[in-house]
Amino acid sequence: MSNQDSNALSKEPQSSKPRLLITRRVFPAVLDALNEHFEIKHNDADEPWGPEQMRANIAPMDALYTVATDRIDAAVIAAAPQLRMIATGSVGYNHIDLGSCRERGIPVTNTPDVLTEATADMAWALLMATARRVTESERWLRAGSWKGWAWDQFLGADLYGATLGIVGMGRIGCAIARRAQGFSMRICYHNRSESAQADALGASRLSLEELLATADHVMLVLPYSQATHHVIGAGQLQGMKSTATLINIARGGIVDDAALADALKQGRIAAAGLDVFEGEPTVHPALLACDNIVLTPHIGSATLSSRLGMAMLAARNLLAWRSGSPLLTPVPGL
Ligand code: DGY
């Protein structure tokens, strides 16, 4: 990505344009769209800023263009007394202290819809790789361990005709369920409220305990909050089938990673596929030591069209704010 348009503001800007902080390297199209309307400071380095750098950089800013892996907590927001708008290039917004935003009247926008199908595809990629031991057997082959075909080599779990349990039946959960129909799966889901879309897909709503006990494959697609912290811990893993797979495409912290590593090691469940981690980009060392796990670096939405769609939607929200027009995708309740 070129960054010729990014202006590292070395001095206080003289223009009357609002000052915008872009916390990570973005597509040139985003800078092209915003440059005329904002005085931009852009972190175009490979490394994200730590908390201190973030507070220092945001201090003089009017607007923020952030991503899911930044931590925009109360201290960061307090460090920016003029901050008036936050656009995140993510559907999730648990990284932003909404309480502080509410108190200060700062609107927040996110990027729903544009990443739904790509993320559902990735959930399926992880499920298939996990259930059929794709990366585990590939590592073994590359290590030169393959001496010949055998009946019992890398036996995996069936997907066709199996029962899929989806925890969190929003847009992405429903998109995953639609794909499951092609595999003739029985679909069950757990959600705070009944989902008409899920019902139309023939999915049955269960309690979390029932779902975990019933499903051959469990997909986590729920937003992270204090209420969903460690929703899957030792007790819940104990309640799953010993042959089951667990996929987390949602957020780190929903699963207790230490408890999961323990369950995988003890064979309490068969395998797991994770795209998100507690404390990412650090991955719990006990998970790294497991063979029966597929690990990917938070790439659920990582197709060019999806990421560009997210990046431009965040930019369009900033432009709407700048021109006083209604925000396109505001986070509800702010
Ligand atoms: C999101 O949009 O919340 C994703 O986690 C970022 O890819």
Image (tube, helix red, strand yellow):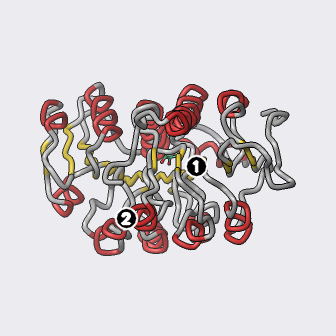
Residue at position x 19%, y 55% in the image: 192
Disc 1: CA contacts within 10 A as few (<14), some (14-19) or many (>=20): some
Q: Foreground: 255 or 3?
A: 3
Label located before the other in sequence (2 or 1): 2
Task: Classify the position of the N terminus by image quarter.
Answer: top right
User: Where does residue 222 sit, x and y in percent of width and height?
Assistant: 34, 53
Which label lies toward us, 2 or 1? 2
What element does badge 1 sit on? loop
Residue located beneath label 2 in the image: 225
User: Where does residue 153 sit, x and y in percent of width and height?
Assistant: 51, 45
Left or right, 35 with reference to 294: right
Residue at position x 43%, y 37% in the image: 327
Left or right, 191 with reference to 321: left
User: Where does residue 242 sit, x and y in percent of width and height?
Assistant: 31, 61
Residue 152 visible at all = no
Instruction: Name which residue type carries label 2.
Output: Ser
Residue at position x 44%, y 33% in the image: 325
Above or below for 30 versus 66: above
Residue located beneath label 1 in the image: 296
